[in-house]
Image (spheres, rainbow, N blue to C red):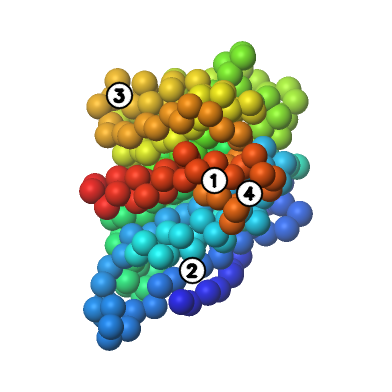
Amino acid sequence: MIYKEENINIDYEGYGLEAPPQKATIQSYIVDSTDQTYLNRKRPAVIICVGGGYEKVVSEKAEPIALQFCASGFHAFVLNYSVTPVRFPGALLELSKAVATIRASASKYNIHEDKIVICGFSAGGHLAASLGVYWKQGFIQRYLGYDNDENQPNALILGYPVISNKEGIAHLRSMQNLLGKYPDQKELELFSLEDNVNDLVPPTFLWHTSDDPIVPVDNSLLFASALRKHEIPFELHVYPSGDHGLGLANELTASFLGQINPACQNWIDMAIRFINNL
């Protein structure tokens, strides 16, 4: 295993944006090749964006998830993205650059450049889905100067994601932290992601619990419905019951006993199978 941590460097001030108090980082968990694991095998890569309502990044949940993916043959990367007081599009630019940076390292680390997956949870799921929807849009391209699809995610894995801005469905704290207390109408429309799904959104695996008390399951249902309308491959699993923020739904990521939920623990196996079958 090769482990390293490095900064995501973006010229915020050059783009007329407020720089974050500290730089975003990406932690890399790279499965090293040996003679016993057939040298130079190309592996898919997964970029993990945990949640925290765009107020914090709940980083303690990230490493167990990364290691689970590594055990299943993936290279794993954890993005510690910027949160409030940094507003849109700070975190989205950081994730976009992370995808491009990992793709540029494909030859060095035997990464399958056409299987770069973003796995996001809660507000991190909103971030992942946002790049899935907007990676080709001009407001990202002009900031980072991409013109060869280098920031394109090839698939999404979304766990109990924040998706919608609609009344009764939106997770208001996440939206306020991302956009500020008084966003304009254009920004509000931009971040009801279900209304902005397009043919460039990658295949998507979603999972949620039907009684999630923080982010209603409607968020996943609306996104899945939009994917279906655009004939984008997706897989959706709605578990009958479970708290928010489950992570792996076992003791490795549980913050309290209610987050140990055996019925939900198979999501990662199904997600990995979904990605391997693409």
Seen at 58% across and 70% down, the residue is: 5
Sequence-wise, the earlier of marks 2 and 3 is 2
Looking at the rendered image, the disc whose residue lies closer to the viewer, 4 or 3, is 4
Sequence-wise, the earlier of marks 3 and 1 is 3
Number of labelled discs?
4
Give the residue at mark 2.
29
Q: Tags 4 and 3 in contact by the CB under 8 Å rule?
A: no
Above or below for 134 versus 5 = above
Q: Which mark is residue 228?
A: 3
CA neighbours of label 1 inside 10 A, class few (<14), some (14 to 19), many (20+): many
Q: Tags 4 and 1 in contact by the CB under 8 Å rule?
A: yes
Seen at 47% across and 55% down, the residue is: 47
Residue 169's x, y, as percent? 58, 19
Residue 256's x, y, as percent? 69, 45
Q: Nearer the viewer, residue 126 or 213?
A: 213
Sequence-wise, the earlier of marks 4 and 1 is 1
Q: In 3D space, how far apart are the residues under numbered discs 4 and 1 (Cα atoms)?
A: 7 Å
Q: Tags 2 and 3 in contact by the CB under 8 Å rule?
A: no
Q: In 3D space, how far apart are the residues under numbered discs 3 and 1 (Cα atoms)?
A: 28 Å
Give the residue at mark 4.
254
Q: Tags 2 and 1 in contact by the CB under 8 Å rule?
A: no
CA neighbours of label 3 inside 10 A, class few (<14), some (14 to 19), many (20+): few
